[in-house]
Image: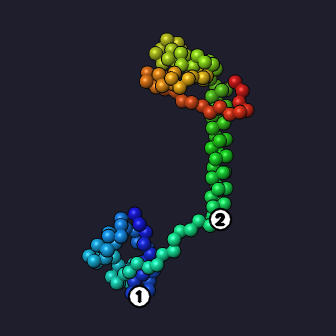
Amino acid sequence: MIRFSLICDNEHEFEGWFRSNDDFDTQKKRGFVDCPSCGSHKVEKALMAPAVSTARKQETIALAMGEAQKQALAQLKAMAEKVRENADYVGDKFAEEARKIHFGETDPRGIYGEATLEEAKGLAEDGVDFMPIPVFPDDRN
């Protein structure tokens, strides 16, 4: 979609959204483009200033992104901590224990541990539900 700044013969300015430049031309020829203020069908595209990202705008966006990243990181850390508080650590036996739980060979319980990429692929192929949890430098088991 393209947004055009438009102006009628009475100098009313407004915006319109079109699929393409050709779509605007076709709708104008068919009389479908009119001024919302006065109803005039004599509408032309007005000069549009390009959207320019100023240094201040970029700084504001960067600050907002930085804050969003901090919040996301805090949520990930809280989730990882909750897993560690409420699940059993099984170390490098994670894939084996997850399969035992999945296939009913042992009682269901929350577990966490380590798995190689190949082990994780195997679990996924077997239909075992699991998800990686982030490990942070200050984490302890």
**Vertical order, 35 against 2 (above or below):** below
> Secondary structure under badge 2?
helix
Q: Position of residue 84 (x, y in %)?
A: 66, 26
Task: In this rendered view, identify the residue nearer to me: 139 or 102.
Answer: 139
Q: Is residue 113 left or right of residue 15?
A: right
Q: Which mark is residue 73?
A: none
Q: Which residue is denoted by mark 1 in the rendering?
A: 10
Whether residue 80 is visible here, answered yes or no, is yes
Q: Which quadrant: the N terminus? A: bottom left
> Secondary structure under badge 1?
loop
Q: Position of residue 11 (x, y in %)?
A: 44, 86
Q: Say which amino acid is labelled 1.
A: Asn
**Vertical order, 7 against 123 (above or below):** below
Graded by Cα atoms within 10 Å as few (under 14), some (14 to 19) or many (20 or more), the crowding at tag 1 reads few
Judged from this view, the residue extending furthest toward the left is 30
Whether residue 14 is visible here, answered yes or no, is no
Q: Which quadrant: the C terminus? A: top right
Q: Which residue is denoted by mark 2 in the rendering?
A: 55
Q: What residue is shown at x 46% (from left), y 15% (from top)?
A: 103
Quarter of the image where one finds residue 87:
top right
- Separation of residues labelled 2 and 1 (CA atoms): 37 Å
Q: Say which amino acid is labelled 2.
A: Ala
